[in-house]
Amino acid sequence: MIRTKKVREPASMARIKDLAPDDRPREKLMRNGGRVLSDAELIAVLLGTGTRQVSAVELARILVKEYGSLADLVRREPPELAQFKGMGMVKAARLTAAFEIMRRVQSGAGLEKRRIRSPKDAVEEFLPYLRDLNKEVFKVILLNSANRILRDIDITQGTLNASLVHPREVFKAAIDHHAASIILMHNHPSGNAEPSSEDLTITEQLRQAGQVMGIPVRDHIIIAAGSFTSLAERGYL
């Protein structure tokens, strides 16, 4: 459920064009680079314009204050951002697109997929996508015979349980894309990377199915914030 944001009217309604040139975020960025800008000023550049009631700078300050940090802000979905006074869907979509570009750059999307030699390799590839989510996402990573990533597929979203993560869905994707092996991965929005009893049940079910199908499960990795747990390293695979 999306909370409606009750944003207080800012004390100052100064428009960006009314600011001194040295204080305008876009001009500061062009003159000195992005590093000199505050978090709110960077967000203001992305927003572009405000409204008669609130400037882009003031709206950006409200967003940063509401969520406390950029790391928390980037986790928000467009409909939630659009609830802020002065935002709307266009500005919310613009911010979300910028956050997605950041994740793709961090993950190396568009580059040749790396060979997965260790759990850390897989985590570095997908951490930018999974660490910021506020719901659980279970994905299967398909590998070729050289352990390079063929593609990754989201199997389910929401609270994880064995009835939702069915071997049929996992291994259909593997067969369709001629995968030689797979890695399972999901996130814990709680920030705790320890496996639950349900995680272990799912892992064992899929391990057994992989043996039957001749498509081994190499690992099941749980990501939480900036940490991870490899069930292969724990001896479950």
Image: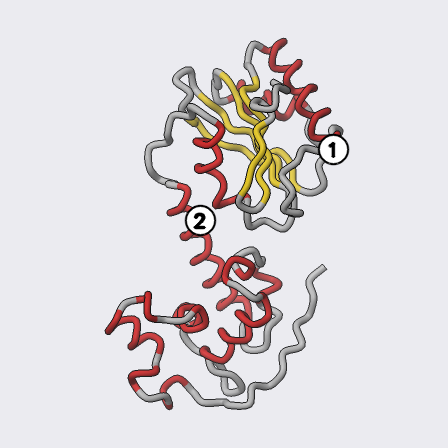
Q: Residue at x 72, y 41 (%)?
A: 159
Element on which disc 1 rests? loop
In the rendered image, residue 43, in percent from the top left (x then y), is placed at: 44, 69
Mark before the other along the chain sequence, 2 or 1: 2
Q: Is residue 187 left or right of residue 18?
A: right
Q: Tag 1: residue type?
A: Asn
Q: Nearer the viewer, residue 188 or 147?
A: 188
Rate crowding at label 2 as few (under 14), some (14 to 19) or many (20 or more) other CA atoms within 10 Å: some
Q: Residue at x 46, y 56 (%)?
A: 99
Q: How far is disc 2 from disc 1 in space, using C-alphas?
A: 27 Å
On residue 161, the disc is 1
Q: Is residue 225 left or right of residue 29?
A: right
Q: Residue furthest left?
A: 31
Answer yes or no: do the residues labelled 2 and 1 have beta carbons within 8 Å?
Answer: no
Q: Which quadrant does the C terminus fall into? A: top right
Q: Tag 2: residue type?
A: Arg
Rate crowding at label 1 as few (under 14), some (14 to 19) or many (20 or more) other CA atoms within 10 Å: some
On residue 213, the disc is none
In the rendered image, residue 162, in percent from the top left (x then y), is placed at: 74, 28
Q: Which quadrant does the N terminus fall into? A: bottom right
Number of marks drawn: 2
* Residue under label 2: 103
Figure check: 211 above or below 75: above
Q: Residue at x 42, y 20 (%)?
A: 147
Q: Is residue 207 left or right of residue 227?
A: right
Figure check: 192 above or below 231: below
Q: Quadrant of residue 211?
A: top right
In the rendered image, residue 6, in percent from the top left (x then y), is placed at: 67, 77
